[in-house]
Image (cartoon, rainbow, N blue to C red):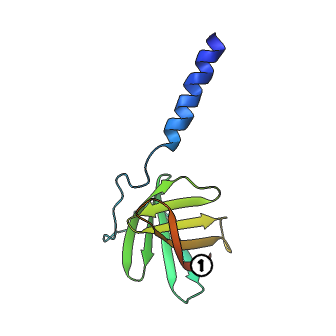
């Protein structure tokens, strides 16, 4: 019986950790200054644009794209790290030089939209 209670409690914790909405407390296009504590990772995109991404905490990212800053919150992903802010998503895979980052539109229903930029860290 005790094992059943522990397994039930653990299952509830796991499910509740995944149930946060990616829309919670997301700031759309706002001016942002990178904090001194976070490092900036620079990406060059296939279109010629660049993206500067910083990660002030393990739960957030700040993405600079075409002169605008976007505050994003981490959300569930199948692989890599996925951040959502307003109408955009920033999805990264890997780390260091040659890591990949893709900027997507974020649909109102919470799904990933069309790809905007495919980028590589430099």
Return the x and y of residue 81 as percentages of the image width and height: 58, 59
Residue occupied by mark 1: 118
Q: Residue at x 66, y 68 (%)?
A: 96
Which quadrant of the figure has residue 36?
Answer: bottom left
Location of residue 88 in the rendering, given as x and y in whole percent from the top left corner: 44, 69
Judged from the image, the secondary structure of the residue bearing numbered disc 1 is strand
Q: Residue 33 in the image: state x and y as whole percent.
A: 35, 68
> For this view, does 71 lie left or right of residue 49?
left
Neighbourhood count class around disc 1 (C-alpha, 10 Å): few under 14, some 14–19, many 20 upward: some
Picture residue at 63% right of the left edge, 59% below the top? 80
Q: Residue at x 52, y 75 (%)?
A: 114
Q: Work out whether residue 20 or residue 36 is closer to the camera in this orientation and state it.
A: 20
Compared with 20, 71 (above or below) is: below
- Residue 15 in the image: above or below residue 40: above
Q: Nearer the viewer, residue 116 or 55?
A: 116
Task: Confirm whether residue 34 shows in the render.
Answer: no
Q: Quick one: which residue is furthest to the top in this view?
A: 1
Can residue 115 be spotted in the picture? yes
As displayed, is residue 21 above or below residue 62? above
The quarter in which the N terminus is drawn is top right
Quarter of the image where the C terminus is located: bottom right
The correct choice, above or below, for 76 with respect to 116 in the image is above
Give the number of callouts. Answer: 1
Query: As drawn, which residue projects farthest toward the bottom?
Result: 48
């Amino acid at each position: 019986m005790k094992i059943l209670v522990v397994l039930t409690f653990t299952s509830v914790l796991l499910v509740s950790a995944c149930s946060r909405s990616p829309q919670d407390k997301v700031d759309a296009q706002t001016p942002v200054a990178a904090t001194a504590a976070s490092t900036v990772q620079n990406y060059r995109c296939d279109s010629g644009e660049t993206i500067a991404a910083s990660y002030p905490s393990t739960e957030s990212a700040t993405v600079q794209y075409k002169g605008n800053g976007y505050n994003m919150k981490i959300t569930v992903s199948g692989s890599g790290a996925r951040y959502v802010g307003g109408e955009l998503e920033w999805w990264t895979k890997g780390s260091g030089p040659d890591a990949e980052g893709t900027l997507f539109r974020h649909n109102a229903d919470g799904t990933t939209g069309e790809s905007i930029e495919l980028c590589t860290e430099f």
